[in-house]
Amino acid sequence: MMRTSSANRPDLLAAGAAGVTVVMWASAFVSIRSAGAEYSPGALALGRLLVGAVVLGLICLVRREGLPPRAAWPGIAISGLLWFGFYSVVLNWGEQQVDAGTAALVVNTGPILIALLGARLLGDPMPPRLLAGMAVSFAGAVTVGLSMSGEGGGSSVLGVVLCLLAAIGYAGGAVAQKPALGHASALQVTTYGCLVGAVLCLPFAGQLVDDVAHASLSATLNLAYLGVFSLALAFTTWAYALARTTASRMGATTYAVPALVVLMSWLALGEVPGLMTLAGGVLCLAGVAVSRSRTRSARVVASAPRPEQTRESA
């Protein structure tokens, strides 16, 4: 029993890290909605990245983390450009053009793209349970998106295209991180990816200075929260979990975000969800549960003692 528990510990830690990421990313939607009213898309992205880079840099100094190995830099650079930088700006811009429901629906094509890219580029397996879970979760995301799209919400072609580009950037950056994590730590990959994204967003520095001067304290605190928690903490726990599972499975896990956004909006903003929204949230969570489950034979193999453990016990 003790052997089984110790063998399962890495899986539990990875699942816990993925859970932290999902909760922090869900809370980010509430903060972005508040800060985005007073910060322009580029300024919000740069401010969030700078705050995250400072926090991560201090942690690296305390832990005496050096530079990542040369082999990790291609993945770090690609994820920094596509995910930390490009994704942040186009998503902020897209959410100003379309309603929240449409944005959530389009961006949630990201996990599907991660699965396809992961299978093609990384050789990730596509077990039936993962595919079934993703199908259920995507149906839930569609339900949530449609229920949140009010009749008065505008859905411009530009906004839809921007959200689709954000999903592509998210998928490409997430898949690029996986090989980098084979050479560098989760903290290194996150820190230097964040720095690459910040450099990409430096042209928005003037807007950031102007927005900080005129923004309310509440909006600025939301920007700081986005940098510390939904970026520095959440991206590090994401990288930790990604290093211990496939990109496809991690992408499917993020389908829990729409369900948590509905719950957080209900609690924090008093936005009472309708029955269709609640049903979509339940589908999202059910799909994640299915995608992360394993067959009985897989669980037996995972819990079986390794040969060296058998020899030691003998």
Image: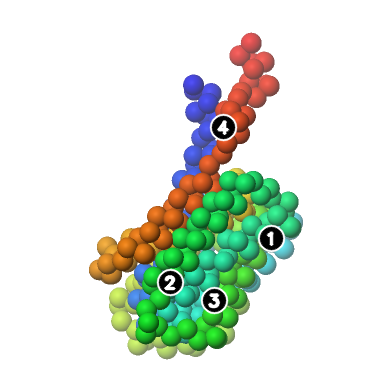
Give how far across and how far down residue 54 sits, in percent.
49, 66
Whole-number angstrom distance, CA of label 4 to CA of label 3: 39 Å
Give how far apart the Cα atoms at labels 2 and 4 are.
36 Å
Residue linked to disc 2: 146
- Name the residue that disc number 1 marks: 117
Q: Quadrant of residue 113?
A: bottom right
Decide: is 130 above or below 52.
above
Give the quadrant of residue 190. bottom right
Name the quarter where the C terminus is drawn: top right
Q: Determine the residue positioned at 60% across, 61% down.
A: 112
Task: Report the residue at 53% width, 23% height from top.
Answer: 3
| Residue at the far left in the pictured view | 270
* First in residue order: circle 3 vs circle 2: 2
Q: Which residue matches tag 3?
A: 163
Residue that carries the numbered disc 4 in the rendered image: 296
Which amino acid type is shown beneath numbered disc 1? Leu
